[in-house]
């Protein structure tokens, strides 16, 4: 489940709930213009009205939130210069500038919500182009607490076949299931300097 709110500089005021959102992720850019499809928007008229009013008053910007089973916000995607491109039955297509999460990020968040991340190497169920999504998720959300005494790290190179797989393996060997220890060279350097993990 997703939700939408306008950025009013105060606490989050959710305008509506949404069953699903398409086109929120990208592996090629972090920020860009994009159209996103909101599927099964509850109180669609209220949302449309609020966006139209925001456009007339100030630069309209907001958030698309991913929610857990208790409707608490897990993560948010920022969108600015929001325009309604198309409206049909229960769906809307919004256009604007988005801060993207890597491909697979929301899929992994849903796995987390459904308690599907309970053992090492769960990341192996993902496609290769979704591994950065796993690594960003692990760095932002997962907070495993491994036993730090007498920690011995053993990495079998047969368990991964690319650099992202190495970072996934390393993170779990050091910080437990869903653990993080860098997702590219500079992040790994930060972790090795004890700035993280």
Image (cartoon, helix red, strand yellow):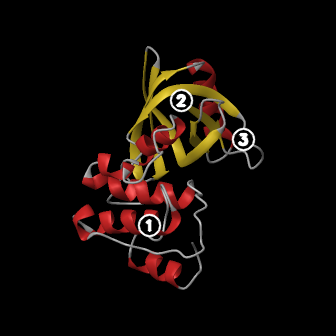
* Residue nearer the viewer, 153 or 61: 153
Q: Which mark is residue 12?
A: 3
25 in relation to 136, above or below: above
Q: Quadrant of residue 157?
A: bottom left
* Residue nearer the viewer, 113 or 81: 113
- Asked if the residue at tag 3 contacts the one at tag 2, i.e. Cβ–Cβ closer than 8 Å, the answer is no
Q: Quadrant of the C terminus?
A: bottom right
Q: Residue furthest bottom?
A: 193
Left-right relation of 66 to 186: right
Mark 2 neighbour class, 10 Å CA radius: few under 14, some 14 to 19, many 20 or more = some
Q: Residue furthest front?
A: 150
83 in relation to 139, above or below: above
Q: Residue furthest right?
A: 10
Residue identified by numbered label 2: 1
Q: Label 2 to label 1, Cα distance in Å?
A: 32 Å
Q: Label 2 to label 3, Cα distance in Å?
A: 16 Å
Q: Label 1 to label 3, Cα distance in Å?
A: 37 Å
Residue identified by numbered label 1: 173
What secondary structure is found at the residue carrying circle 1? helix
Q: Position of residue 30 (x, y in %)?
A: 42, 60
What secondary structure is found at the residue carrying circle 2? loop
What secondary structure is found at the residue carrying circle 3? loop
| Residue at image point 38% right, 62% down | 168
Q: Position of residue 114 (x, y in %)?
A: 50, 34
Left-right relation of 161 to 105: left
Q: Position of residue 69 (x, y in %)?
A: 60, 29
């Amino acid at each position: 489940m997703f939700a939408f709110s306008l950025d009013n500089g105060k606490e989050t005021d959710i305008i509506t709930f949404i069953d699903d959102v398409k086109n929120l992720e990208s592996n090629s850019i972090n920020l860009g213009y994009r159209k996103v499809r909101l599927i099964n928007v509850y109180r669609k008229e209220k949302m449309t009205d609020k966006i139209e009013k925001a456009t007339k008053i100030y630069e309209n910007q907001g958030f698309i939130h991913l929610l857990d089973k208790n409707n608490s916000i897990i993560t948010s995607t920022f969108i600015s210069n929001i325009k309604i491109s198309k409206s049909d039955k229960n769906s809307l297509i919004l256009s604007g500038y988005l801060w993207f999460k890597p491909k697979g990020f929301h899929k992994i968040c849903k796995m987390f919500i459904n308690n599907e991340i309970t053992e090492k190497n769960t990341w192996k169920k993902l496609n290769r182009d979704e591994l950065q999504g796993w690594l960003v998720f692990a760095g932002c959300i997962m907070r495993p607490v491994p036993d730090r005494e007498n920690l011995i790290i053993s990495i079998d190179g047969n368990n991964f076949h690319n650099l992202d797989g190495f970072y996934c393996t390393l993170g779990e060997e050091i910080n437990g299931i869903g653990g993080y220890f860098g997702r590219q060279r500079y992040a790994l350097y930060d972790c090795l300097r004890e700035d993280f993990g």
